[in-house]
Image (cartoon, rainbow, N blue to C red):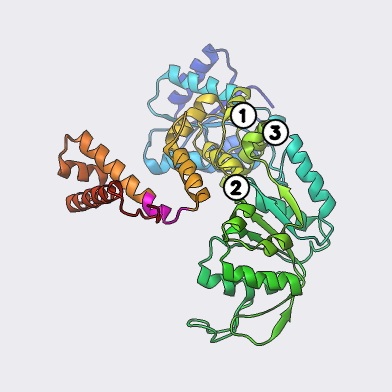
Amino acid sequence: MTREIWIADDDRNVRFVLAAALRDAGHEVREFDQGNAVRTALRDDTPALLVTDVRMPGEDGLALLQAVHVHKPHLPVIVMSAFTDVSTTAAAYREGAIDYLAKPFDLDQAVEAVERALADAPDEDTIEQPQTDALLGESPAMREVFRLIGRIAASDLNVLVTGETGTGKELVARALHAESARRARPFVALNTAAIPAELLESELFGHEAGAFTGAHRRHAGRFEQAEGGTLFLDEIGDMPALLQTRLLRVLAEGEFYRVGGRELLRCDVRIIAATHQDLDARIAEGRFRADLKHRLDVVRIALPALRERRVDIPLLARHLLADAARQLHVAPKRFSRSALRVLSSMDFPGNVRELENLCRRLAVIAPGREIVPTDLDRDRVQAGIDADATWADALRAWADQALAQGQTDIHAQARDTLDRVLFERALAAHDGHRGQAAQALGVGRNTLTRKLGSSRSRRRNTAEGAPSRNGSA
């Protein structure tokens, strides 16, 4: 790999002045007048950086960029063009360009962009390569998780995986299946909280034709689909009571009926269940069956929150960033050491899933090949995240407390509070002018007036001792 900078532009004057400026800055430069010549030269050598025009005779800059992205994915490319429309700019970044110079450009800014790109560009062996195993960690807590997986995977024991939302419970289930004797049979996952209660029974056990309105043909449920393999039941703590009873029978007897069916079906399925909730607390509230919990909780694997294993954050971040670049078909990037230190200090209430989403945004939005702390600040602003605390964090804490206290109808309470706060702040910002406040919020004036009235009425009733929505006096 040479340390030369290659310039491709059919305009001789542009090549001349840019090359001269770069040579004055101490760089070696090689010039090309068309994309085909660059592609031929790339067979024998690779520059430190390629600067290419978009529109050239023969192969244009975007086609060249696409070829470079496929065959030389670590080669940084700066695109320059007199055409600064959205489609051209977006196409350049989509094909892997790390910067875009609009013609006519200031030579000092062009040299600065080149030197920034050279400083950002990592050697090929420093780019993190995607790994197939996304269940990663070097912390003591994760080593214990891996040890448990290794010890129990080969057995047919039912497993309960616990942990906060986003900690990777399904990854544990898939790892247990992949290391078991059932690995050649299906792995079937079902989020019991994502299926309406009236449909969940059919999803689990299947149904016969005519069992209910819309059941035009026989449907095999998840137990039949997972025969001989593993059935992963996510968010088991949210399963309705009636379904808990039916599931208990299957676990105890190994048999079930389809909805509307008379044929008794036998099943050979290993159950792995997961929940972010405290099942013992739900049992005490009468919302979960103790005998079902004992059937599921034969072996428990507790996943730590990401904030409890900060030492794993750099490893996860590098892996997730590389994986995001591969999936999104963008040029690979890397985290600077200072950026990794900042990441390791963050709490990530959404755990690994939140870190994954951040890495996906950075893979697309971060301007350079190396992600620095200022990119993290920019990302948090673009994602609508305050650096210290967010209203979403406060909402999570309130929801956790309300659920722990057994309150009901908390969605209506939260919605009413949200409406009231937004309307009051909008009125304050517009000196009490309801029309302007409504316009700022994107609602009609009548809607604003009606909701303000109903909100005040509810608060007055509560203050006078009327029962609130959650049934407390």
Question: Quick check: 397 left or right of 188?
Answer: left
The amino acid at mark 2 is Gln
Helix, strand or loop under label 1:
helix
Residue at (68% x, 60% y) in the render: 293
Amino acid marked by disc 1: Ser
Q: Amino acid at mark 3?
A: Asp
* Quarter of the rendering containing residue 299: bottom right
Mark 2 to mark 1 CA distance (whole Å): 24 Å
The label nearer to you, 3 versus 2, is 2
Q: CA distance from mark 3 to mark 1?
A: 42 Å
- Using a 10 Å C-alpha cutoff, classify the residue at mark 2 as few (fewer than 14 neighbours), some (14 to 19) or many (20 or more): few
Residue nearest the observer in this picture, 279 or 74: 279
Disc nearer the start of the sequence (3/2): 3
From this view, report whether residue 50 is shown above or below residue 209: above
Q: Position of residue 226 (x, y in %)?
A: 71, 69
Residue 344, numbered circle = 1
Q: Nearest the camera: 85 or 335?
A: 335
Secondary structure at badge 2 equals helix
Secondary element at image label 3: loop
Q: Which residue is mark 3?
A: 44
Is 33 rendered above or below residue 202? above
Label pair 2/1, CB-CB below 8 angstroms: no
Query: Which residue is label 2 attached to?
Result: 327
What are the residue bounds of the magenta stretch?
A: 407-413
Crowding at dot 3, Cα within 10 Å, few <14 / some 14-19 / many 20+, comes out as few
Which label number is shown at residue 392?
A: none
89 with respect to 459 (left or right): right
Earlier sequence position, callout 2 versus callout 1: 2
